[in-house]
């Protein structure tokens, strides 16, 4: 009787040790996944920042590239005409801020594959920056979206939300 009691205690100790080891390994794996996600997020932010810096160096509008300043926002490109002009076959050819609208690309980095896309719209003012308007104004908002694949498809059964960076460009003469 005492032998079976000791065997049960030994079995219980083994099970308890196994559960502790399993939880430890699960925690360690979760920390590794979080570290990898943080590195991927940093890379996504760097990619988005690069595009924003590039777009900032361009003219506010195709019609505002000359010497004469635009006197009225109604002279700017209508939002329905945002995107590349047809003659701009690559991002390097873009010559104004709204040419980036609708642009999408895939990029391979040391941290994996990324998918990016850009939206540009007019906003009425800085206080209403979350609302796009369908008319010209002195403010354009660029939203750069960068997405990467799931690191742990078991833990994340749905796609992660993309990393989004926004920049507001304003025109004053």
Image (cartoon, rainbow, N blue to C red):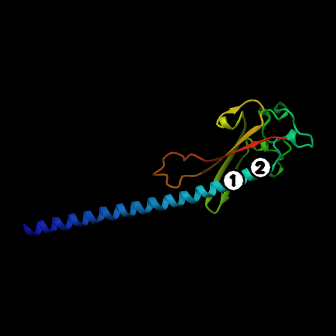
Left or right: residue 118 versus residue 38 is: right
Question: Residue at (26%, 63%) from the top-left corner?
Answer: 16
The image shows residue 9, relative to residue 58, as above or below, that is below
Count of labels shown? 2
Query: Disc 2 on helix, strand or loop?
Result: helix
Q: Residue at x 87, y 37 (%)?
A: 70
24 vs 12, left or right, is: right
The picture places residue 9, in percent across and down from the top left corner, at: 17, 66
Residue annotated with mark 1: 49
- Residue 33 horizontal/vertical position (percent): 49, 59
Residue at the disc numbered 2? 56
Which residue is more in the foreground, 56 or 147? 56
Residue that sits furthest to the left in the current view: 1
Q: Quadrant of residue 63?
A: top right
Tell me the quadrant of the picture where the N terminus can be found. bottom left
Q: CA distance from mark 1 to mark 2?
A: 10 Å
Coordinates of residue 25 in the picture (x, y in percent): 39, 63
Badge 1 crowding class, 10 Å Cα cut-off, few under 14, some 14 to 19, many 20 or more, is some
Residue nearest the viewer, comparing 38 with 123: 123
17 or 122: which is nearer to us? 122
Sequence-earlier tag: 1 or 2: 1
Q: Which residue is located at x 79 percent, y 43 percent?
A: 99
Question: Can you tell which mark lies on residue 1?
Answer: none
**8 shown above or below 160:** below
Which residue is rendered at x = 77% and y = 49% of the image? 56
Question: Pointers 1 and 2 in contact (CB under 8 A)?
Answer: no
Q: Locate the C terminus by quadrant.
A: top right
């Amino acid at each position: 009787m005492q032998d079976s009691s000791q065997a049960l205690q030994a079995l219980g100790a083994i099970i308890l040790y196994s559960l502790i080891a399993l939880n430890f390994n699960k925690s360690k794996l979760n920390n590794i996944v979080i570290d990898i996600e943080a590195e991927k997020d940093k890379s996504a932010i760097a990619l988005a920042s690069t595009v924003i810096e590039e777009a900032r160096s361009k003219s506010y509008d195709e019609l505002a590239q000359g010497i004469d300043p635009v006197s009225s926002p109604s002279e700017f490109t209508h939002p329905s005409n945002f995107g590349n002009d047809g003659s701009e076959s690559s991002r390097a050819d873009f010559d104004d801020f709204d040419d980036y609208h609708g642009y999408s690309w895939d990029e391979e980095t040391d941290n994996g594959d990324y998918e990016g896309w850009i939206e540009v719209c007019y906003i009425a003012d800085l206080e209403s920056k979350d609302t796009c308007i369908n008319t010209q104004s002195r403010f354009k908002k660029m939203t750069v979206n960068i997405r990467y694949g799931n690191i742990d498809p078991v833990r994340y059964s749905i796609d992660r939300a993309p990393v989004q960076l926004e920049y507001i460009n304003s025109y004053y003469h």
